[in-house]
Amino acid sequence: MIGYAARRLIQTIPTIFVMSIILFGIMQAIPGGPMAALAFNSHQSYAAKLAIIHRWGLDLPVYLQYFRWIGAMFTGDWQNSFFLNQPVNKVILARLPATLLLMTVGYLLTELLAIPAGILAALKRYSFFDQFVTFFAYVGNSMPTFWLGLMLLMVFGVFLQILPSSGVIDIRVTGAPFLTPEYNTWFSQNPVTGVLDVAKHIILPATTLAIVGVAADSRFVRASMLDAIHQDFVRTARAKGVPERTVILKHTLRNALLPVITNIALELPILFSGAVVTERIFTWPGMGQLFFQALEGYDYPLMMGILFVAGLLVIFFNVLADFAYAIADPRISYA
Amino acid sequence: MLERAVEQQVQVGQQPIVESGYDVAIKQFTLREIIYRRFMAHPLAKWGVVGLLVIIVACYGAPLWHLLFPNFIEAPDDFNVLQAGVGPGPQHLFGTDSLNGHDIFSQVLYGGRLSLIIGLGSMMLATSLGVLVGAFSGYFGGVADAMMMRVTDVLLTVPALLIVPLAARIFGADNPFYIAMIFGFLSWQSIARIVRSQFLSLREMQFTESARALGVPPARIILRHLLPNAVGPIVVAFTLGIAGNIVLEAFISFLGFGIQPPSVSWGSILAGAEEYLIDGNWWWITFPGLMVTVTVLCVNFIGDGLRDAFDPKIVN
């Protein structure tokens, strides 16, 4: 198992390199390149522009530019964001917790609803509840995530006005933006108010993620459960007089949840995309929102940094899925 | 061969089902008929077809509706600022937007033309690419296969949702042709994987071996012997991909990186809506999004029906 884990981790190294080459290539294709943000600055002389081009190494051949960039990525010199005027890695690190928080809560909510719903739907097949879950799954799968978010925002944030529609905290309550040192000291003094404040803000974005997630996962759990319930060992258990409760809880459920676990892990990258969309709608101060800001302002270093981190996250999620598979299914040997 | 088996009569003698006591003739179906029957037996698939046909006729016939009902359907570049932000009513079925006073019902009909063709066109490109890569990879195997699949894997890790707005910005956003191309280039990987896995098992089958023994060239084996056998999963992935790309287009255009205002798509109608949300004009957001949802729902029904129809494990 440890050998497998080590091999799987080593496999990610070429993947990371190819991903970085693709990202670099895409960024090269942007008209104007990194200078695009400065293109309309009339205060800048031509000589000054040439000086910047030389300082950034944009007059070098492309492959040298790539090596300079990838080298800088690994040594931690990610340059300053054009607009925020702070080191890119610090900006991303400051935004990452909000994204991970949203993903975690959305995820837990999804699974807490989807697994019981899928199991119940399978046990009471063709019942009203089953039909309802199927209907919900179809509709939830067909709705654009961003539109669902907008609708929830409109109903609960604008019309009913019972939930906050943007941000992660209420600055009138905390007195400082999320995760700044001032916020952290305030949070350590009033943890209960702090948690409640974040909880109130996370309801709408997390529900958006959860509705889409439940639509996909409940169908999967249901199918997996139905698969397990028709296996021979379940019939054997019933035939020898095992109580139905035990049959379901001990014999069926364990086997049914095996594919569910791996499916959950495989869905992490999809969840990440969902979080990016949701952040944009609810102005959640995470990486997704930061990316769209960077894109609108041609903030080159920030865009490259975010894309790189997002790629790394997806690769990391894929490794997690493989590990979950290896741990959950003892029948597969990875010697 | 299958065609020749049509209407082959099989006698069943022992147990007469018909009351008169005559032997019952059983018609044997061709594969195509079986798939058609299974598809129609799916409770929702045929409603998906009906719904999608209605939407296609409504959207692509929009210029005609404008000529027939000029009071209800505006011309695409027609708007009335004085009527901006009017709620749904007899004059404007879906209301008007708050920015220019476009009639949203007309816009939804006109916008569907681009949204649908982008969904379809992108998946046609993606399917051609995916089949090409997957077939080559799965049939020939070896080093080429290993390399192609690594590239496919890596392309799957590049977060598509972040790349699409970037690519749209690079290639000039307001051209629907480019948008469809970008979507196509970002969604062929899963089809390549499906085709590859199908080909891996099909190429070991005996009919492939006999074709090879007869000296049939690889291109013909792939096109005439393997591809028809893999068509089920490809068609299903194609259909579900259309649904996915219609949603993606809506999001990208909503953000303002996709279809731009003079042209309309379901996403671009929503583009300005977010800022006016606070005014409470719910119709602006609700109806275009509902249209996307209903369309995608129909496409998903069809995809599910096709999956059941092609699934060899399900016996009727």
Image (cartoon, rainbow, N blue to C red):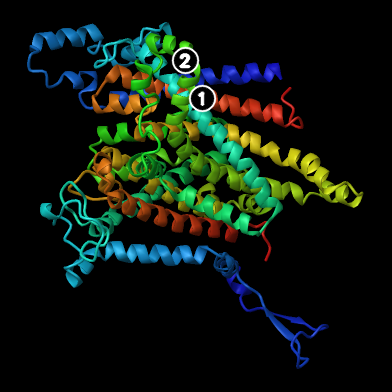
Q: How crowded is mark 1: few (under 14 residues within 10 Å), some or many (20 or more)?
A: many
Tell me the quadrant of the picture where the N terminus of chain B can be found.
bottom right
* Residue at x 69%, y 38% (from the top left corner): A257
Q: In this view, does B68 lie above or below A71?
A: below
Instruction: Name the residue located 41 percent from the left edge and 6 percent from the top edge.
Output: A75
For the question of whether residue B205 can be seen, the reply is no
Q: Which chain carries label 2?
A: A
Which quadrant does the C terminus of chain B fall into? bottom right
For the point 12% across and 8% down, which residue is it? A48
Residue A167 point in image, percent of width and height: 36, 27
Mark number for residue A190?
2
Residue closest to the eye, A287 or B209: A287
The image quarter containing residue B304 is bottom right
Q: Residue B146 carries which label?
A: none
Q: In this view, does A70 lie to the left or right of B222?
A: left
Mark 1 = which residue? A315
Closer to the camera, B179 or B206?
B179
Identify the amino acid type marked 2: Asn
